[in-house]
Image (spheres, rainbow, N blue to C red):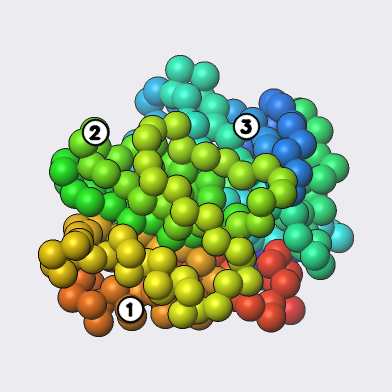
Amino acid sequence: MARGGRGFQGTVLKALRVPEHKLTVTGVRELPPYTELIVQCPSLLGSGAAALPPTAWVRMWIPHDGREYQRAYTLTRIDRSQASARILFLHHEPAGPASQWSSHVRPGATVAVQVMGGTSYRSPSPGDRLLLVGDRASAPALVDAVNAAPVGSPATVIMLAPRDGYLPMAERDHEFIRLDPEVLEDRLLAAVDRTLWADTGDLALDWAWIALESSVTKAVRRHLVASGMSRRSIQHQAYWIRGRAMGVASEA
């Protein structure tokens, strides 16, 4: 087993010599169904650190029962002058290591993080017409992408989320469409089509970002490609897998 009880994933990252950073929790705020942490880390978030693109996520090593479990979380509202950022932890049932840890963590706590694979975001070009499709798990990253979009690029957000509870929202103007999280796939694709096609019958999108449950993410991407969007203009990331409790490690 890897150093600190990190299992196979820890062994791989150690072999690849991926740098490790230490986040210090400086603030905690409950925003049901989320817990928001304010964190500081000069080596990762300071003015001299490498730039991170919108939606960038880190591999956090969450302590739980004598082990450390790797979980990916998006850094938002990065402030280089304070070497700080915010992380939203979505609570769910059954609660995994990350959900449990964030429910009890207090200012002063530290957690190890590594950056590998979470910085492949491709920014839209000025004037691109944007579609972003997500749910409560991907909402922090989606908000980050909308806020960072070029001025003059119209953005439509389709969000699968219930009407109760806190939901992060982008600060810049955009069209917002909320659907029930249990909506049938055909209704979701119908909502996508209303943004995808102009009244003339031509494609009305230039750039898309999809981050949902794994099978739904694939379905939306297939639909966009079949409709004529280029694969290069579509970014997609499965944020969870139906039937698998988020935060539960698959490795022994």
Quadrant where the C terminus sits is bottom right
Which one is in front in this view, the residue at disc 2 or the one at disc 3? 2
Residue located beneath label 1 in the image: 223
> Is 223 situated above or below 161?
below
Q: How far separated are the C-alphas under marks 2 and 3? A: 29 Å
Q: Mark 3 Cα within 10 Å, few/some/many (few <14, many 20+)?
A: many
Residue located beneath label 3 in the image: 39
Q: Secondary structure at mark 3?
A: strand
Residue located beneath label 2 in the image: 151
Q: Secondary structure at mark 2?
A: loop
Q: Position of residue 109 (x, y in %)?
A: 76, 35
Q: Position of residue 86 (x, y in %)?
A: 58, 35
Q: Mark 1 Cα within 10 Å, few/some/many (few <14, many 20+)?
A: some
Which one is in front in this view, the residue at disc 3 or the one at disc 1? 1
The residue closer to the viewer here, 160 or 195, is: 195
- Sequence order check: which comes first, mark 3 or mark 1? 3
> Is 138 situated above or below 10?
above
Q: Residue at x 58, y 47 (%)?
A: 113
In this rendering, position of residue 74 left or right of residue 206: right
Q: Amino acid at mark 3?
A: Val
Q: Secondary structure at mark 1?
A: helix
The residue closer to the viewer here, 228 or 245, is: 228
Q: Amino acid at mark 1?
A: His
Label 1 close to label 2 by CB (< 8 Å): no
The residue closer to the viewer here, 146 or 54, is: 146
